[in-house]
Image (tube, rainbow, N blue to C red):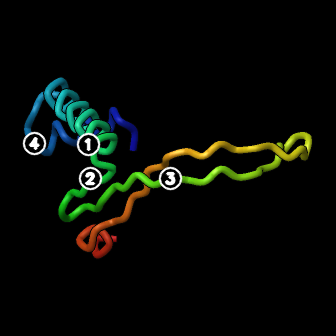
Amino acid sequence: MTKAELIAEIAKTCDLTKADAQNTLNALIEISKKTLKKDGRMAIAGFGSFVVTKRKARTGRNPQTGEAIKIKASKVIKFKAGKALKEKL
């Protein structure tokens, strides 16, 4: 599902205009970014939780040349589905 399709579904489900649905989705995305940056965790009951974790630096390989390269340490976001979401699947 694309962002445009999600906006259309939100508009239809909540009886909103597409512009209002887009503003709502954009607000959710911005709030999520701020929360994850500040707290490193965000949970939505019935859906799941997002957690920021650290990935260690490691050695990888360039697929074209086979040469060993260093991959820097980074932060990644992991998602764990909630019980209600797992049961729906």
Amino acid marked by disc 4: Cys
- Give whichever of discs 2 and 3 has the lower sequence position: 2
Disc 2 target residue: 42
From the image, tell me which residue sits under label 4. Answer: 14
Q: Foreground residue, 37 or 62?
A: 37
Q: Mark 1 to mark 3: distance in Å?
A: 17 Å
* Picture quadrant of residue 78: bottom left
Q: At numbered mark 3, what does the secondary structure look like: helix, strand or loop?
A: strand
The picture places residue 20, in percent across and down from the top left corner, at 14, 27
Are discs 2 and 3 less than 8 Å apart at CB? no
Kind of element beneath mark 2: strand
Q: Where 69 falls versus 22 (above or below)?
A: below
Measured in 3D between alpha carbons, the distance from the residue under mark 4 to the one under mark 1, in whole angstroms, is: 25 Å
Nearer the observer: mark 2 or 3; the answer is 3
- As drawn, the residue found furthest toward the left would be 15
The quadrant the N terminus occupies is top left
Nearest the viewer among 70 and 83 is 70
Q: Which mark is residue 35?
A: 1
Residue 81's spot in the image, x, y percent?
34, 65
How would you rate the neighbour count of disc 3 (Cα within 10 Å): few for under 14, some for 14-19, many for 20 or more? few
The amino acid beneath tag 3 is: Lys
Label 1 crowd (10 A; few <14 / some 14-19 / many >=20) = few
Residue at the spot 70% in from the left edge and 52% down from the top edge: 58
Q: Residue at x 19, y 27 (%)?
A: 23
* The disc label shown at residue 67, or none: none
User: Quick one: SS at disc 1?
Assistant: helix
